[in-house]
Amino acid sequence: MARQIFVNLPIKNMERSQAFFRSLGFDFNPQFTNEKGACLVISETIYAMLLVESFFQSFTKKTITDTATSTEVLICLSCDSRVEVDALVAKALAAGGTAPNAPQDLGFMYSHGFEDLDGHIWELAYMDMAAMQSGA
């Protein structure tokens, strides 16, 4: 069985967060989604648990990071093309997200990203394996 990853993220508003990620083309596993938490399906082995802050706080004694002033984690997802990177960023911006940085083109790798409605940073990267192998 392949190892799975569940990234747990605190959110302020369940309905807004679900609507945001649905507008990017993602879906939620209804078996693990209720008013306190939602299981965002990223792939067959990658999930993000969007947890309302009060519920998230029940899992830790530490203070929840204020994403307006601090970054606790950068989430990076691979994409199949530069077009997919740009399309996801465009969808995120249209849904109310922001782009904290300009796109980066390193020849063999193209990346861009967005901040979701709760300030979590999602990096998107396309790696051109042929260009990487040729040293471009």
Image (cartoon, helix red, strand yellow):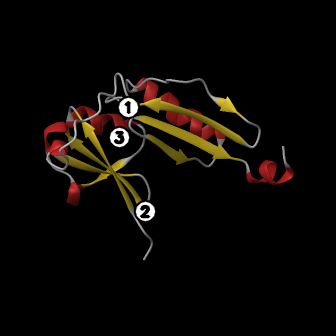
- N-term-proximal mark, 3 vs 2: 3
Mark 2 or 1: the one toward you: 1
- The quadrant in which residue 19 appears is top left
Q: Where is residue 134 in the image (x, y as percent from the top left)?
A: 86, 51
- The quadrant in which residue 83 appears is top right
Query: Residue at the location (43% across, 62% down)?
Result: 44
Q: What is the CA distance from the residue labelled 2 to the residue labelled 1?
A: 22 Å
C-beta proximity under 8 Å, tags 1 and 3: no
Mark 3 or 2: the one toward you: 2
Q: Type of residue at label 2? A: Glu
Kindly identify which residue carries mark 1: 116
Q: How many marks?
A: 3
Crowd rating for badge 3 (residues with CA inside 10 Å; few <14, some 14–19, many 20+): some
- N-term-proximal mark, 2 vs 1: 2
Kindly identify which residue carries mark 3: 22
Query: Residue at the location (20% across, 52% down)?
Result: 33
Quadrant occupied by the N terminus: bottom left
Q: Type of residue at label 1? A: Asp
Q: What is the CA distance from the residue labelled 3 to the residue labelled 2?
A: 17 Å
Instruction: Give the answer, above or below, for where 101 lies relative to 105.
Output: above
Crowd rating for badge 1 (residues with CA inside 10 Å; few <14, some 14–19, many 20+): many
Report the disc number at residue 44.
2
77 sits to left or right of 31: right
Q: Type of residue at label 3? A: Arg
Q: Where is residue 69 in the image (x, y as percent from the top left)?
A: 36, 22
Q: What is the CA distance from the residue labelled 1 to the residue labelled 3?
A: 12 Å
Q: Is mark 1 on a helix, strand or loop?
A: loop
